[in-house]
């Protein structure tokens, strides 16, 4: 059965395919009903019979009367119906069967088809089927992900403010077995990797990638040095999410003894797993060259 996703996201099923899937056809009786009943002129043939009209409420009747003109691949025009009406059409036929008002072999066969179809749709929704058939599921997922990222990431670089509390670094250093000096802003090189892994990779799907792309684009245009990734986060959603996540990591870290970095990582993977990534591998201890945190990507 032909189906499509329109530019505005409306899912439609081909009118011709819809009728065919129930074993129906446009007979002479349907065309006579169209001429005699303006209110139901555009009803699909499978539910346009007079004995079925009592099963259809006014809201559904209005929805079923809406024919959507669209173009299939290649430019050929076609008429379709909103995909979400598909199970409702099944329900009309099944209610008519339960009320014992079906007429003729054709309607009874369509009710059998409706029963088969509604059982299938109970496992996989019509919207999901259309999205899979048209390949829109990939577009849908990208749009959904971008909508999430747009909430977390702003369009402009925010003014610098300390977003990573000293207590967070104190716990990370203690668990790594490093000496912590609160008066020194320099951090081991591995801290930048740890921050990406423990923080940005776990706050939202694709967040790290998008933050890095924004920062790289800014550096390409402005020609200036690195800036903290957290400066790209939005003040209403991004920064609160960062603060909440850091508080959780800090609190969790306190539950582990000095130097138990691997135990801490296992706990983090349980309570805040990374999005679409493999588990963190321990960073080698020799990678502890000090860097100035103010120049770090973290």
Image (cartoon, rainbow, N blue to C red):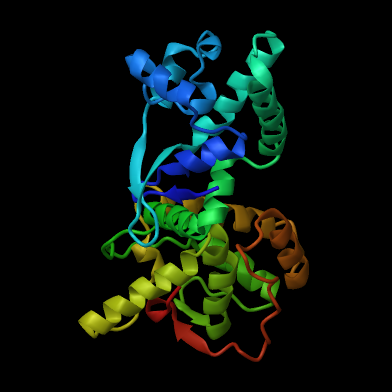
Say which of 187 and 110 sits in front.
110
Q: Position of residue 270 (x, y in %)?
A: 73, 57
Please name the residue shown 53% across and 75% down the image: 181
Q: Residue furthest front?
A: 28
Res 218 quadrant in image: bottom left
Q: Is residue 94 visible?
A: no
Q: Is residue 191 above or below residue 205?
A: below
Q: Position of residue 82 (x, y in %)?
A: 44, 36
Say which of 237 and 130 sits in front.
130
Please name the residue shown 64% across and 14% down the image: 103
Picture quarter with the C terminus: bottom left
Q: Is residue 2 above or below residue 233?
A: above
Q: Position of residue 127 (x, y in %)?
A: 54, 42
Question: As drawn, is 122 to the left or to the right of 246?
Answer: right
Res 161 quadrant in image: bottom left
Q: Is residue 271 visible?
A: yes
Q: Is residue 108 above or below residue 251?
A: above
Res 79 quadrant in image: top left
Say which of 254 and 78 sits in front.
78
Q: Is residue 39 above or below residue 159?
A: above
Q: Residue furthest left?
A: 222
Q: Position of residue 239 (x, y in %)?
A: 41, 54
Please name the residue shown 44% across and 76% down the image: 185
């Amino acid at each position: 059965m032909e189906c499509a996703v329109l530019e505005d996201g409306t899912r439609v099923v081909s009118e011709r395919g819809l009728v065919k899937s129930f074993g129906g056809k446009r007979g002479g009786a349907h065309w006579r009903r169209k001429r005699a009943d303006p209110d139901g002129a555009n009803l699909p043939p499978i539910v346009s019979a007079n004995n079925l009209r009592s099963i259809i409420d006014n809201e559904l009747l209005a929805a079923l009367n809406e024919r959507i003109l669209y173009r299939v691949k290649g430019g050929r025009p076609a008429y379709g119906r909103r995909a979400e009406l598909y199970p409702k059409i099944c329900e009309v036929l099944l209610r008519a069967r339960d009320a014992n008002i079906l007429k003729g072999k054709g309607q009874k066969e369509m009710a059998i088809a409706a029963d088969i179809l509604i059982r299938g749709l109970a496992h996989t929704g019509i919207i999901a089927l259309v999205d899979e058939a048209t390949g829109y599921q990939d577009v849908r997922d990208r749009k959904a992900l971008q909508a999430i990222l747009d909430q977390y990431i702003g369009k402009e670089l925010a003014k610098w403010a300390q977003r990573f509390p000293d207590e967070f670094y104190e716990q990370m250093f203690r668990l790594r077995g490093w000496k912590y000096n609160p008066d020194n802003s320099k951090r081991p090189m591995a801290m930048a990797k740890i921050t990406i892994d423990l923080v940005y990779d776990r706050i939202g799907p694709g967040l790290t990638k998008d933050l890095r792309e924004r920062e790289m684009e800014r550096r390409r245009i402005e020609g200036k040095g690195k800036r903290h990734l957290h400066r790209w986060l939005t003040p209403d959603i991004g920064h609160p999410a960062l603060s909440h996540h850091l508080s959780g990591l800090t609190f969790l870290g306190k539950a582990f003894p000095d130097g138990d970095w691997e135990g801490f990582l296992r706990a983090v993977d349980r309570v805040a797993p990374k999005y679409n990534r493999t588990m963190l591998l321990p960073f080698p201890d020799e990678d502890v060259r000090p860097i100035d945190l103010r120049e770090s990507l973290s």
